Image (tube, grey):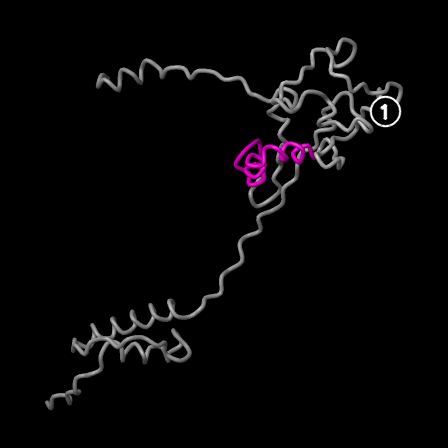
Amino acid sequence: MQAPPTRAPDSRTPCELGERAHASPIGQGAPPRHAPCSNVRVDRSARVTMGLTCALAMACADRPRALRPPPDAGRVEVVARTPEIRTYPCVERCHARRASDPTPRALREFHTGREVHHGPAIRWCGFCHALGDLDHLRLIDGEAVGFDASHRLCGQCHGEKLRDWERGIHGSQSGSWAGVRLRRSCVTCHDPHTPRRPTFDPLPPPAHDRALSRGHP
């Protein structure tokens, strides 16, 4: 039996093989510009593998890739606070018949027990409440905002906390990241008149854990 004819060895370099691969459907278009590989001769299977790997790597590095749009992040809804305020709307329930008094004093008839301990600048109601329209709060520039947007009022001084709250890493939030997220405003956790939260000391770990840390069963 006559032996099959032998084929001359392929003398192309890995980079030359990579150039050919770029013309294939895997990497359409003109070959990228790059420094040639060294002319080291390797066997055919290794050269094919190296050429395809080189071509694919250069195609990914040199050509812009279309980025997929991010998934729908859903929407954020701030939970309304006014339905939980027993005396709201303030004007209709009381202040249409009673003018507000801007004089700092101990409250003995209405809002009894309410004290303001909110830093050195805020000493009385008029700093945050619109005394001419007690159904609204008042920003520093005089703009009136509703009680359901009280986070705007807090954010005037607490900008860092407002930024974290808007990003969902501070405060109370529930729902789905891909659906509707219900975000609670600052006053859900902080009393706006005395916002400092009480502190407490952590309890020691359980006795069983302490025994395990000493190597006992």
- Residue 174 shows in the view: no
Q: Residue 119: x, y in percent? A: 60, 22
Q: Amino acid at mark 1?
A: Glu
Furthest toward the right, the residue is 97
Q: Residue 14: x, y in percent? A: 24, 76
- Figure quadrant of residue 194: top right
- Figure quadrant of residue 93: top right
User: Which residues make up the magenta segment?
Assistant: 149-175
Residue 28, compared with residue 210, is above or below; it is below
At horizontal 58% and vertical 34% (from top left) the residue drawn is: 173
Whether 164 is among the magenta residues is: yes
Q: Residue 113: x, y in percent? A: 69, 11
Residue 114, compared with residue 132, is above or below; it is above
Which residue carries the number 1 mark?
A: 92
For the residue pair 17 and 190, the one nearer the viewer reads as 190
Whether 139 is among the magenta residues is: no
The quarter in which the N terminus is drawn is bottom left
